[in-house]
Amino acid sequence: MSQQNRSFGALPLVGKAALVVGAVFLVVGILGFIPGITTHYGGMKFAGHMSEAKLLGLFNVSILHNIVHLLFGLAGIALARNPVTARGYLLGGGVIYLVLWLYGLVIDQHGSANFIPVNTADNWLHLLLGLGMIALGFATTRGGAGAPAGPAPRGTR
């Protein structure tokens, strides 16, 4: 495969979207392990609501939470190469984040079910991420994962 085929410019729009979303998740996962950017870093636990660490002083994080961000980011980067898998990443990831938003709404944030952990700021972010990823998955494709976004070519139905 030539270098041109692997460049960002050669990716379909849905692939670019998946790559950018994946890169953001990867960066967020890394930032979750940096003291100062993550407040109360010494209080970070592997998992659970007892983790006191907060990314940017706002979003509850744990080691597990950060690892999930890293893996989700790597998945987006890996799946960005193919329009079908890139679209699947955006749509499937969006659904996962909407489920996570619902999960965060129904659990007791101070109970053992909050193993991720999530707080109110996380819940709002998960809602926006879910809706945004689904919107990107549809907006960057039309008529299927391989079809370009935008108006139909002349003379086609």
Image (cartoon, helix red, strand yellow):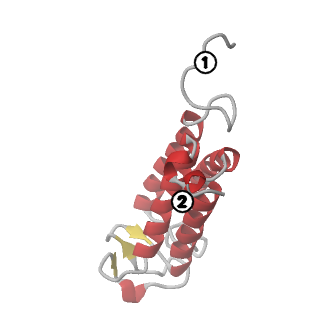
Q: Check the image and report above or below for 26 versus 99.
A: below
- Left-right relation of 34 to 63: left
- Residue at x 58% of width, y 64% of height: 72
Q: Tell me which numbered mark, 1 or 2, is placed earlier along the sequence.
A: 2
Going by the numbered disc 1, the residue's amino acid type is: Pro
- Residue at x 68% of width, y 37% of height: 146
Residue 154's spot in the image, x, y percent? 61, 12
Going by the numbered disc 2, the residue's amino acid type is: Gly
Residue position for label 2: 104
Between 101 and 69, the one nearer to me in the picture: 69
Which tag is nearer the camera, tag 1 or tag 2? 1
Residue position for label 1: 153
Instruction: State which quarter of the image contains the C terminus.
Output: top right
| Secondary structure state at the residue bearing disc 1 | loop
Q: Quadrant of residue 39?
A: bottom left
Between 88 and 44, the one nearer to me in the picture: 88
